[in-house]
Structure formats: structure tokens, C-alpha cells
Image (cartoon, grey):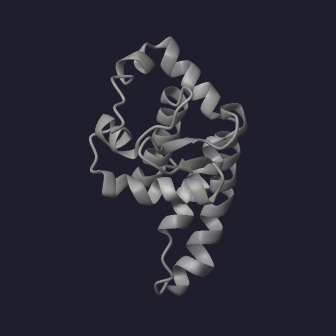
């Protein structure tokens, strides 16, 4: 069964969090990291990759943070996963067995998985979080200093 990396899951969670909390003002990286129990330095590279890819928009200044760069219904989980995984790729030595046998065999399953993920939007995840009451639970105070 295909499994998303922790980095990909974190990237999706960060975008959903920003979509839920950015109501007219950016979400501070520090507040976002606290809500997810992470040190800000762990989350920042993921956020920056999402900014460079046009998923999030970074806002500088004392009341800065992150907001969605486009409508949440136009952002798919598949797109976020591609960005997170690309940011984590290393050009280390890859054994020929992986290149010639394993990667091609897994590629078809990955295509199907990506197609399924492309149908899941941030809007859909936000709506589910709101219906299940999780949006309110994670919507604690967002203090910007």
C-alpha cells in the first residue's frame, strides 16, 4: 500500500491549517508549528518549498506569516505531495536494481495513487475538519507579536 512520507503529511497539514486560520491575516509560522507540536525550524523548509511552488504566499513583517496563494479548491493534495517529495530528493548513488527493476514496477501504482490524491482538495479537507469539529479545536489563539 502506498504511504505518504511524514514530510508530505506535514506539508498537507500545514496547508490545511493555513486555509483554516488565515482569515484576513497571515498565519505565523511559530503559531502553526506550536499547533502541530513541532519546532519552527522543522516546519520552515516545508513552508518555503510551498511558497516557491505557489501554494502559499509568504508575508513579511511583524504581522507576517503565510496565507494561501490561490483558492483552496484549486490546491490538490497530489500537488502538495509532489512539492514536499521533490524538496526531499537526494541525488545519492542509486543502485541499478532500483533504477531498472524496482522503480519501473512501482511507477504504475504511484500514478494511480497520485490520480486519487489529485481528486482531494484542500477545500475538501477543510470542510471535513469543520464538520468534524477539528477546525475549532485547532483554532486556538493565533498571536502575532
Position of residue 99 measured from the top left corner of the image (x, y, whole percent): 59, 79
Q: Residue at x 45, y 45 (%)?
A: 9
Q: Residue at x 65, y 44 (%)?
A: 69
In the displayed structure, 37 sits above or below 39; it is above
Q: Residue at x 66, y 41 (%)?
A: 76
Relative side of 17 to 37, left or right: right
Relative side of 62 to 83, left or right: left
Q: Residue at x 34, y 32 (%)?
A: 143
Front-most of residues 115 and 57: 57
Quarter holding the C terminus is top left
Q: Quadrant of residue 140?
A: top left
In the displayed structure, 105 sits above or below 31; it is below
Count the numbered circles shown: 0
Position of residue 41 measured from the top left corner of the image (x, y, whole percent): 32, 57
Front-most of residues 117 and 132: 132
Relative side of 41 to 93, left or right: left
Front-most of residues 126 and 78: 126
Position of residue 33 measured from the top left corner of the image (x, y, whole percent): 33, 43
Position of residue 102 measured from the top left corner of the image (x, y, whole percent): 56, 71
In the displayed structure, 96 sits above or below 48; it is below
In the displayed structure, 102 sits above or below 8; it is below
Amino acid at each position: 500500500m502506498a504511504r505518504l512520507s511524514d514530510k508530505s503529511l506535514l506539508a498537507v497539514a500545514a496547508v490545511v491549517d493555513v486555509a483554516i486560520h488565515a482569515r484576513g491575516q497571515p498565519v505565523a509560522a511559530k503559531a502553526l508549528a506550536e499547533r502541530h507540536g513541532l519546532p519552527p525550524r522543522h516546519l520552515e523548509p516545508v513552508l518555503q518549498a510551498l511558497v516557491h511552488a505557489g501554494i502559499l504566499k509568504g508575508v513579511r513583517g511583524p504581522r507576517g506569516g503565510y496565507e494561501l496563494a490561490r483558492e483552496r479548491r484549486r490546491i490538490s493534495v497530489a500537488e502538495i505531495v509532489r512539492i514536499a517529495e521533490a524538496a526531499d530528493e537526494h541525488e545519492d548513488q542509486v543502485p541499478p536494481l532500483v533504477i531498472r527493476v524496482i522503480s519501473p514496477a512501482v511507477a504504475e501504482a504511484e500514478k494511480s495513487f497520485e490520480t486519487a490524491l489529485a481528486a482531494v482538495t484542500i477545500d475538501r479537507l477543510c470542510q471535513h475538519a469543520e464538520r468534524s469539529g477539528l477546525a475549532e479545536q485547532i483554532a486556538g489563539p493565533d498571536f502575532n507579536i
